[in-house]
Image (tube, rainbow, N blue to C red):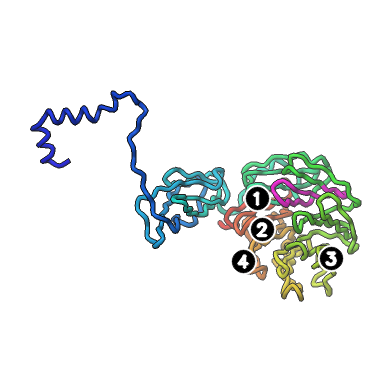
Amino acid sequence: MTRPVMASLARRPAAWLLLALTALAPIGGCNCNATRSVTPIILPPLSAVVVTPATDTLRVGDIVQFTAVAYDTLAQPVAGAGFAWSSGNTAVFTVNSTGRVTAVSEGVDTLFAQTGGRTGIAIVFVFRDTGWVTQTSTTGRNLNGVFFLPDGQSGWAVGSGGVIVHTSDAGAHWSTQVSNTSNNLNGVWFTNATDGWAVGSLGTVLRTIDAGATWVRLTVSSSDNLMDVCFADADTGFAVGSSGAVLRTIDGVAWQKTSITGTVLQSVSFAGPRNGWIVGDGGKIFGTTDSGIGWTLVQPAITTTNLNAVWRRSAESAWAVGDQGVAPLTTGTSAAYGWTLGSAGAVYTLEGVCFPDPMIGYAVGASGAGAILRTDDGGSTWQAQAAHASRTLNDVYFVDALRGWAVGDGGIIVHTSLGGGQ
């Protein structure tokens, strides 16, 4: 209020009193719940809502302010627009009414800002720590296989004596599930959030349809030691093991066995429903392009060294690892694929491999202590990372190029949320 007006009111005390009484009148009225009406902001038709920053990486506990701008159909910013903010997963991060985000736990999810029938988004990635970090597995038994769902939150690891451990928070906490077997378990695979399989010694095939709350042993016509399991799609799966055993299912329940060699088959991997690879002792590599109905031995052999793990990303791209650091990879096209012999270093015995990206891959094993290697050029060269594991690592699984877990002897579980970087 300007001074002339204030002076005018001061000269007219009666008028000032009348204004004061008028302002207080609603207090003495009958409707005590009445609120002052607010004229809503009428937004023009909008073309978009843009959230800034569009992506961000936060450590657990970080607080960051996001902003949003609404644009009309002429691509001009609209003043006065209010936004309804929400988190795609409040277990990963929360957001208040002004767009201030608080990182809660590891994961990746979407931040939403909505107004006028339009929604803007940003991707928020939350990590716990840099490098490889040890997680408490709740078991001292050897862990031989690990698998995570794409959300990077739910995962399972299996091992000796029938042990199965599970996490629903990216490994911050692991708990034991009842496997109903004392046989060693070597591989685990899930096709969705509830349906999973674990395989192991003496023809053990376990199945769950409730995320591992209950595991049931299936009857299979095999007593072979099964070393690995992989599903090509929701229904078609494969398990491989000793004496060249290959078990195949098309419904997840009934498994049929064939034998394609006399040696131990260590690992199987599919890219889509038709294209798969199997590797094993003596450098054996078998391929299929017809959903495992037939398997063809790669000849001539590119190595006679044991191959312990294989990962296939596409019809053309696959990698294997084994003893003495052998690290063969495919070349060519799906119609004329071949393998070439690579090496990650003869000092390493490699037990597991995973390629979350066509160029970025990880291999684990041992060289005295536990070893983790990373490649950024599609497997041509490999660099050692600090594994922080005193014993052999037996398997590795990544949900993207940054977030991965490796498991090993003595119940070791190590995890990275930044691609193993320091």
Q: Classify 10 Å Cα crowding around label 1: few (below 14), some (14-19), many (20 and above).
A: many
Q: Classify 10 Å Cα crowding around label 3: few (below 14), some (14-19), many (20 and above).
A: some
Magenta stretch: residue 190 in it?
A: yes
> Does label 3 or label 2 sit earlier along the sequence?
3
Figure quadrant of the N terminus: top left
Residue range corresponding to the magenta coloring = 186-205
Residue with the mark numbered 3: 282
- Quadrant assignment, res 75: bottom left
Q: For marks 4 and 3, give the CA distance.
A: 28 Å
* Disc 4 versus disc 3: nearer the observer: 4
Q: Which mark is residue 414?
A: 1
* Disc 2 versus disc 4: nearer the observer: 4
Q: Position of residue 206 (x, y in %)?
A: 81, 46
Q: For marks 1 and 2, give the CA distance.
A: 10 Å
The local secondary structure at tag 4 comes to loop
Magenta stretch: residue 97 in it?
A: no
For the point 65% across and 60% down, the residue is: 356
Q: Which mark is residue 372?
A: 2
Q: For marks 3 and 2, give the CA distance.
A: 23 Å
Q: Which mark is residue 376?
A: 4
Q: Position of residue 315 (x, y in %)?
A: 73, 68
Q: Classify 10 Å Cα crowding around label 4: few (below 14), some (14-19), many (20 and above).
A: some
